[in-house]
Image (cartoon, rainbow, N blue to C red):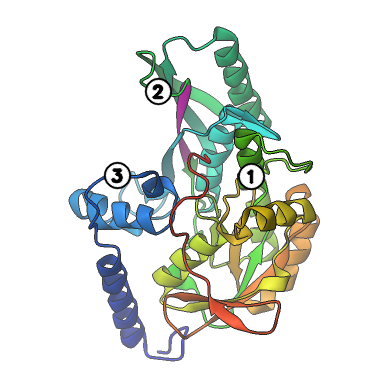
Amino acid sequence: MTSRIGTSLPDQVARMEKADVARRSRYRMKDTHITLSHGSGGKASHHLIEGLLIPILANPVLDGLGDSAIISPNGNGSGRLAFTTDTYVVSPLFFPGGDIGCLAVHGTLNDLAMSGARPLCLSVGLILEEGLLVEVLERVTQSIADAARSAGVAIVTGDTKVVERGKADQLFVNTSGIGLVPDGADLLPERIQTGDRVLISGTVADHGMAVMLAREALDMEADISSDTAALHELVDTVLAAAPNTRMFRDPTRGGVATSLNEIAGRAACCIRVDEDAVPVKPAVRGACELLGIDPLHIANEGKLLAVIPAAEAHAALAAMHGHELGRDAAIIGEVVPEPVGMVVLNTGIGGSRVLDMLVGDPLPRIC
């Protein structure tokens, strides 16, 4: 039996296991103190998660490190559920195109969607700082309700805690979600094959730059809004057009570059990206250039990456273009066998370079 990279299946399994061991060794936790970079989604976050937390908490479900945990309540592999949780500490609470409330709902729904799950329900936990204006809490809660209602998902349970003044920054939100995974939906990096195409559903870096400009009150006349949105219906659209889709990933913290590196590491392959093919709005590109930031390292909250067989890639692209959230979709790269675990960027000037994970954190508390 041959594998996706032209070697025997046992050889491929050994190769992926070797890549997994190398990745865990690479991210061994060596820091002595937590810094803001540990929340960036980049290398420092991986050091924290794979170098400290996973070795302590390890179990077969958690070790998958997917956007959602896939569990089978009846134990026979059918009736699978996706379960995910996330905590939102974005600053400021309100920014062009969104706020912490809708962001929390969308982010959790999207984590479920990346596993192909159909969302069933959400929980909301609120950590409130003494002195928070009630009108701010009401506004955020209304945004949570509106986002959930628009997505057709109910908030079914929740919790509130209040901490002393100065012990939190106004308001933090935790959301958890449960979704039903259809039979046959196995969206995993292990399914990726050489020659597969990588698609992005739209322009990158919109959310990160919108939050940064709102936070820093920079004197820039730029029409930039967050892209926060729920993606589960777009996922259904893509799967209908490309039923053999390998996997999805929403490139949030750390941006497209970090997500692609995670995929390449898990799949034990290389992803080659065409820089000119990556859609970036002119205003966002201009702001990134002015601030010296690579848009491929900036967070997105309403975009997805999809790895799709070459034979279905253009059908998937057309389906995305027909959906409101995929009008700017593009094919941006291809899966190749070497160098394993790396992302290579074909630059606009005709060269190539390694596109690494985010290092440091130019935009802390972005979600």
Circle number at residue 168: 2
- The residue closer to the viewer here, 60 or 30, is 30
Question: Bounds of the magenta span?
Answer: 171-178
Count of numbered marks: 3
Residue 166 in percent (x, y) is at 38, 18
- Mark 1 is surrounded, within 10 Å at the Cα level, by few (under 14), some (14 to 19) or many (20 or more) other residues, namely many
Q: Which residue is mark 1?
A: 207
Q: Residue at x 40, y 69 (%)?
A: 266
Q: From the viewer's perspective, is residue 329 above or below residue 84?
A: below
Q: Main secondary structure of the magenta part?
A: strand
Mark toward the start of the polypeptide (2 vs 1): 2
Give the secondary structure at mark 3: loop
| SS assignment at label 1 | helix
Badge 1 or badge 3: first in the primary sequence:
3
The residue located at (25%, 57%) in the rendering is: 51
Q: Amino acid at mark 3?
A: Ile
Nearer-N-terminus badge (3/2): 3
